[in-house]
Image (spheres, helix red, strand yellow):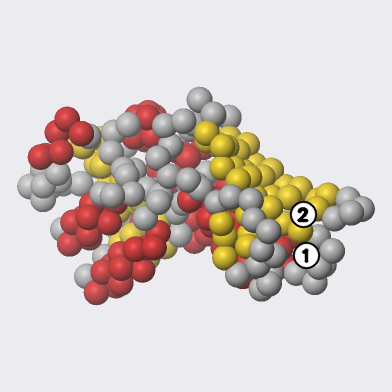
């Protein structure tokens, strides 16, 4: 499979390493130094583009790729309020698009555990829920896309939580997400239910970027020769 990497930072390089080991070819990398190479002509012959960039450029990048009929896998976070626009474009253009706030296989299993636990806790008003997330200092968005996904899943099952907030709050309708940025930390997500009697906690801790990169390559393999919008739930068959 011929892959283009849109975004060639630490994640792009980790994806490159795993993709090449699996026998794929990286035929184009786009970073800040060669942004002018992000053209339809330069992407000729690409089977799938994997996009990990910034909240400000993600939608524009995805729009171009779908318009050029190139299947796209995106893991950019901080822009999901515009995700529906990208999904609608994918449907209109009969494109192929996989989006996830986190491509780690372990995190996507963690998502399913989070939903099940929230469902079990929905009637347990004596417990208060809070989320914590820790990432490296270079991460540009807070809270993380993964933390927002976890929060949205919880709110689907616990209706008295009306909105998430990225701070401590006295409002019982707020679902608190506490964000920390610690140098070199790949990512830790912690969901905690507390009562006067006990705590129930689930935690996912990433040791490095390999899990995210491996999942992105898996998604690229999945989307080739498909049409439509998908998430990692479909990729992994969860």
Q: Residue furthest left?
A: 41
Residue 194, x across and y down, in percent: 80, 53
Mark with earlier residue (1, 2)? 1
At x 27%, y 56%, the residue is: 59
Residue 55 placement, left or right of 128: left
User: How many circles with numbers are drawn on the protein?
Assistant: 2
Looking at the image, can residue 209 be seen?
A: yes
Looking at the image, can residue 113 be seen?
A: no
At x 22%, y 70%, the residue is: 93
Residue 58 placement, left or right of 110: left
Residue 175, x across and y down, in percent: 63, 59
From the image, tell me which residue sits under label 2.
193
Residue 212, x across and y down, in percent: 48, 40
Which quadrant: the N terminus? top left
Helix, strand or loop status at disc 1: helix
> Closer to the observer: label 1 or label 2?
2
Helix, strand or loop status at disc 2: strand
From the image, tell me which residue sits under label 1.
121
The label on residue 104 is none
Residue 140 placement, left or right of 195: left
Q: Residue furthest top?
A: 184
Foreground residue, 118 or 98? Answer: 118
């Amino acid at each position: 499979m011929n892959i283009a990497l849109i975004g060639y930072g630490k994640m792009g390089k980790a994806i490159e390493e795993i993709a090449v080991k699996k026998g794929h070819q990286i035929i184009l990398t786009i970073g800040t130094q060669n942004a002018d190479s992000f053209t339809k002509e330069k992407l000729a012959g690409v089977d799938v583009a994997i996009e990990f960039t910034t909240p400000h450029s993600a939608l524009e990048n995805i729009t171009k790729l779908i318009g050029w009929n190139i299947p796209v896998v995106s893991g950019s976070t901080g822009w999901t309020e515009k995700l529906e626009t990208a999904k609608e474009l994918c449907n209109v253009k009969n494109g192929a698009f996989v989006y996830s706030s986190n491509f780690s296989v372990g995190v996507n299993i963690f998502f399913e555990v989070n939903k099940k636990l929230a469902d079990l806790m929905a009637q347990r008003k004596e417990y208060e829920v809070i989320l914590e997330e820790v990432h490296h200092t270079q991460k540009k968005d807070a809270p993380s896309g993964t933390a927002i996904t976890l929060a949205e899943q919880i709110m689907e099952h616990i209706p008295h939580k009306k909105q998430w907030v990225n701070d401590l709050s006295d409002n019982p309708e707020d679902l608190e997400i506490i964000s920390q940025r610690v140098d070199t930390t790949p990512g830790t997500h912690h969901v905690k239910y507390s009562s006067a009697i006990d705590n129930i906690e689930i935690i996912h801790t990433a040791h490095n970027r390999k899990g995210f990169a491996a999942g992105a390559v898996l998604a690229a393999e999945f989307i080739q020769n498909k049409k439509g919008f998908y998430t990692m739930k479909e990729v992994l068959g969860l």
